């Protein structure tokens, strides 16, 4: 396992722990793409808490989140061969699959969840994945800096949409404002965000 | 910029002066129903738009770091059981379209196809535009609150250029890029093979250019992620029996975008 080329580390000295953690994650993901079941198990151990957090928050109920998590890992197994370490960080790639699957589930439900989850799930420490924060420092600072430039209501709506995976209709319902108004807030907010991020 | 919400009743949704942020909206996940389906179609049809969506996913990705982790239930064994059972379960379908192989060998093939569909699809579409389809009737948008788009990369058995198929559930339409699968005095017929293993004809492919087929209601129900699309060579105009009579010349597996 340590002989895989993707495990090769920076030539000079000991790599920072976060670099090593990311390299490890990239390694197990790439080997999962080569259908290595042992790496897939390691991937589950390293990432299931993060991905379950994504599924739980968006699905809003434990059993559904568990079922979605099951599908997420089946998808990961099938698609890992297409993962390109140069294009996306492993956790972004994995979390995007989890978020999209959870949103698919949520969109398929007839009943809208008009209120946020009340029973906040317990949080745990995820040392290996916290590393992503370090690596994405620059992107992260840019995003958060640009978000500060938005009106609070725009920022809140965009943030809620991301973390709760909710639609315009649900955002409007939660805030008790007309749908058109919510769309307008968010669109303007996104336009301003784009200007800041890409400008 | 005004802090006031726009006046109600300006245009259909009061948004006449709001910028088009569809790519960001899709990446953020706020779209629903027909708006979401339309945006997904646009991803497939417009490479610039697809890149814009990708760019937005990147913009928003730092937020994943803040996402609280929760101790996951230990469902690894259940997941592995599903992986182990996926291969035998696929056999009735797969045996129709591939020569028998070692048992463990089936799944990698399917996995590879799915990966191709997921990874290579946008690239394929950049260079191989899909044929246009008549716009759906206005009533179509009411029918399907959830309108998934399914894709498949249909790979010819001779390993020539794959044919991309895109199924739009909201309109019940499947579109395929140009295929040169038909030969003289034979038609290339498209089939869906759902989990029960029975092929159902979706229609005959055009001999020139791409193909767009609007499916009957019974076939629409058969198009789901994991179903196999296969192309066989049949007498001109299609199989007279309703079941494939000729050899399979290409196949692929439908997956969600």
Image (spheres, coloured by chain):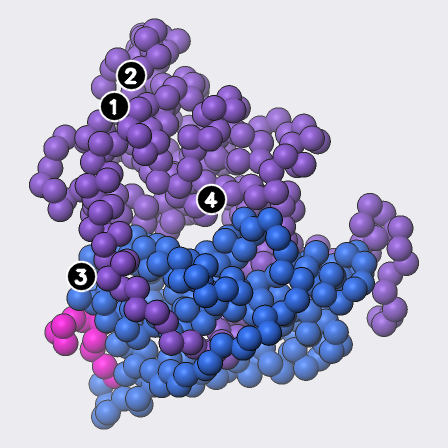
Chain colours: A blue, B purple
Q: Residue at x 54, y 77 (%)?
A: A120
Which residue is labeled 3 in the image?
A36
Tell if the residue under mark 1 belongs to the same chain as the one under mark 4.
Answer: yes
Chain of residue at mark 2: B
Is B256 magenta? The answer is no
Which one is nearer the viewer's eye here, B23 or A128?
Answer: A128
- Which chain does the residue under circle 3 lie in? A
Labels 1 & 2 near each other (Cβ < 8 A): yes
Q: Is residue B90 visible?
A: yes
Per the image, is A6 magenta? yes
Front position among marks 1 and 4: 1
Which SS class for mark 1?
Answer: strand
Mark 1 vs mark 4: which is more N-terminal?
Answer: 4
**Residue under label 2:** B244
Check disc 1: other Cα within 10 Å, few if <14, some if 14-19, many if 20+.
many
Task: Determine which residue is flagged by label 4.
Answer: B126
Q: Is residue B58 left or right of residue A124?
A: right
Q: Are marks 1 and 4 in contact (CB under 8 Å)?
A: no
Foreground tag (4 vs 3): 3
What secondary structure is marked by label 3?
loop
Asked if labels 2 and 3 touch by Cβ distance under 8 angstroms, the answer is no
Give the residue number, with chain letter if any, for mark 1: B248
Query: Is B240 placed above or below A193 here?
Result: above
Q: Give, as a single range, the part of the protein colored magenta.
A: A1-10
């Amino acid at each position: 396992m340590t002989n895989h080329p993707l495990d090769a580390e920076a030539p000079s000295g000991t790599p920072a722990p976060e670099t090593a953690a990311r390299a490890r994650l990239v390694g197990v993901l790439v080997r999962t793409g080569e259908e290595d079941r042992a790496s897939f198990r390691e991937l589950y151990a390293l990432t299931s808490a993060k991905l379950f957090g994504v599924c739980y928050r968006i699905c809003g109920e434990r059993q559904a989140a568990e079922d979605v998590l099951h599908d997420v890992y089946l998808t990961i197994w099938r698609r890992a061969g297409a993962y390109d370490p140069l294009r996306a960080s492993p956790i972004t790639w994995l979390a995007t699959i989890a978020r999209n699957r959870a949103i698919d589930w949520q969109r398929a439900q007839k009943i809208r969840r008009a209120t946020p989850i009340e029973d906040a799930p317990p949080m745990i420490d995820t040392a290996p994945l916290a590393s992503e924060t370090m690596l994405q420092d620059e992107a992260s600072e840019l995003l958060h800096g640009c978000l500060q430039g938005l009106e609070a209501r725009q920022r809140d709506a965009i943030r809620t949409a991301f973390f709760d995976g909710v639609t315009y209709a649900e955002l409007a319902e939660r805030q008790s404002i007309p749908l058109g108004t919510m769309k307008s807030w968010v669109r303007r907010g996104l336009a301003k965000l784009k200007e800041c991020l890409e400008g | 910029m005004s802090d006031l919400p726009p006046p109600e009743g300006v245009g259909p949704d009061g948004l006449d002066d709001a910028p088009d942020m569809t790519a960001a909206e899709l990446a953020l996940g706020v779209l629903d129903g027909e708006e979401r389906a339309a945006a997904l179609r646009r991803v497939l049809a417009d490479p610039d738009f697809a890149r814009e969506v990708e760019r937005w996913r990147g913009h928003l990705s730092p937020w994943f770091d803040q996402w609280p982790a929760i101790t996951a239930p230990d469902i690894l064994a259940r997941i592995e059981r599903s992986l182990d059972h996926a291969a035998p379960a696929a056999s009735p379908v797969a045996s129709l379209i591939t020569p028998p192989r070692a048992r463990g060998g089936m799944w990698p093939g399917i996995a590879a196809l799915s990966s191709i569909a997921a990874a290579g699809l946008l690239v394929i579409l950049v260079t191989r535009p899909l044929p246009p389809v008549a716009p759906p009737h206005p009533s179509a948008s009411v029918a399907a609150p959830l309108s998934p788009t399914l894709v498949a990369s249909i790979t010819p058995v001779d390993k020539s250029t794959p044919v991309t198929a895109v199924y739009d559930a909201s309109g019940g339409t499947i579109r395929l890029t140009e295929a040169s699968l038909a030969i003289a005095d034979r038609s290339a017929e498209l089939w869906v093979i759902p989990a029960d293993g029975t092929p159902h004809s979706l229609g005959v492919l055009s001999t020139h250019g791409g193909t767009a087929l609007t499916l009957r209601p019974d076939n629409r129900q058969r198009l789901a992620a994991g179903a196999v699309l296969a192309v066989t060579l049949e007498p001109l105009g299609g199989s007279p029996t309703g079941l494939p009579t000729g050899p399979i010349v290409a196949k692929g597996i439908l997956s969600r975008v």
